[in-house]
Amino acid sequence: MSRRKLKNIFETGFEAVYAFVKNQAKIISKQSKEIKMLEKSIKALEDRLSQNSTNSSRPPSSDWPMKKRSLRKKTGKSPGGQKGHRGHNLKMTGSPDSIKVISVSSCSGCDRSLKEIESDGYKK
């Protein structure tokens, strides 16, 4: 409310000031009740949000996804093979004991015939 309007109410007399104050008290009372109602609903929503499977009868599948922390201690080394370490793996042999040829007559995805395609991937 502007200073001019307030001055006009004051100059009008005691009854105008009394009516103004009474009206403001009603507004404040109404706002106070509304604030209390909103606080209750906020509290209820916060209580619902803070529930999980450990403090309510909700199943664990309803819990928010939480990032699991590793129990391993940090060593300072980079992950994977360390520098200077020679890897160990199986080497291809020049003369295998046996060779198995597996022929496929049709595509497993679309059932299209593969008869016109050679085993090395080129058409006949």
Image (cartoon, helix red, strand yellow):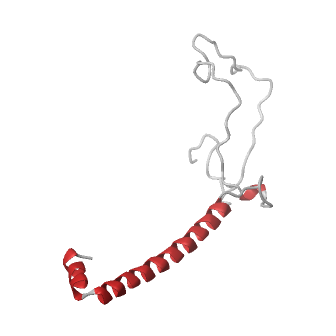
Residue drawn at point x = 35 percent, y = 87 percent:
19
Residue drawn at point x = 23 percent, y = 76 percent:
2
Q: Is residue 19 above or below residue 124?
A: below
Classify residue 87 by image quadrant.
top right
Quadrant where the N terminus lies?
bottom left
* Number of dots carrying numbers: 0
Classify residue 26 by image quadrant.
bottom left
Q: Nearer the viewer, residue 121 or 108?
A: 108
Left-right relation of 24 to 67: left
Q: Is residue 72 above or below residue 14?
A: above
Q: Nearer the viewer, residue 85 or 104?
A: 85
Left-right relation of 40 to 22: right
Residue drawn at point x = 61 percent, y = 40 percent:
120
Q: Is residue 55 above or below residue 29?
A: above
Residue 116: x %, y % from top left: 62, 52
Name of the residue lying farthest toward the front: 14
Q: Nearer the viewer, residue 7 or 102?
A: 7
Classify residue 41 by image quadrant.
bottom right
Left-right relation of 120 to 16: right
Name of the residue lying farthest toward the top: 84
Residue 34: x %, y % from top left: 52, 76
Residue drawn at point x = 43 percent, y = 80 percent:
25
Residue 86: x %, y % from top left: 63, 12
